[in-house]
Image (cartoon, grey):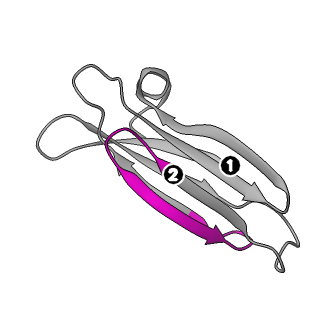
């Protein structure tokens, strides 16, 4: 599950706090492996056990064209999703 929350940045502009949470139950023997990156930055990979989270802050650029794409792997299943996509999230996320 990915959660995006908007906050006001102290110097103007908005920040988006992004959290990806391993919501699987009873998977303690096999972690959810996640790797997130964009054109600007590579956040690297993490192995998330049950209910662990991976979080970061996004600051949209002037054109609102940035994103964070993540690849998740669990057992033999692999999925790609956009945890943050400025053109999508700046309109749907409120301040709180």
Magenta range is 36-53
Q: Based on the picture, tell me whether residue 41 belongs to the magenta stretch.
A: yes
Residue 13 x/y as whole percent: 20, 34
Position of 17 relative to 60 (above/below): below
Secondary element at image label 2: strand
Determine the image quadrant of residue 26.
Answer: bottom right
Residue at the right extreme, as displayed: 26
Residue located at (59% from left, 65% from top): 53
Residue at the bottom extreme, as displayed: 29
Residue located at (47% from left, 28% from top): 89
Residue located at (34% from left, 49% from top): 41
Task: Please name the residue that numbered disc 1 is placed on.
Answer: 1
Mark number for residue 36? 2
Residue 22 x/y as whole percent: 70, 61
Residue at the left extreme, as displayed: 11
| 54 and 93: which is toward the camera | 54
């Amino acid at each position: 599950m990915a959660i995006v929350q908007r906050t006001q940045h102290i110097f103007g502009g908005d920040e988006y706090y992004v959290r990806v949470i391993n919501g699987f139950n009873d998977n303690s023997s096999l972690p959810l492996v996640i790797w997130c990156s964009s054109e600007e930055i590579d956040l690297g990979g993490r192995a998330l056990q049950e209910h662990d989270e991976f979080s970061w802050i996004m600051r949209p650029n002037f054109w609102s064209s940035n994103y964070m794409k993540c690849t998740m792997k669990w057992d033999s299943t692999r999925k790609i999703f956009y945890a943050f996509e400025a053109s999508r999230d700046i309109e749907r996320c409120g301040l709180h």
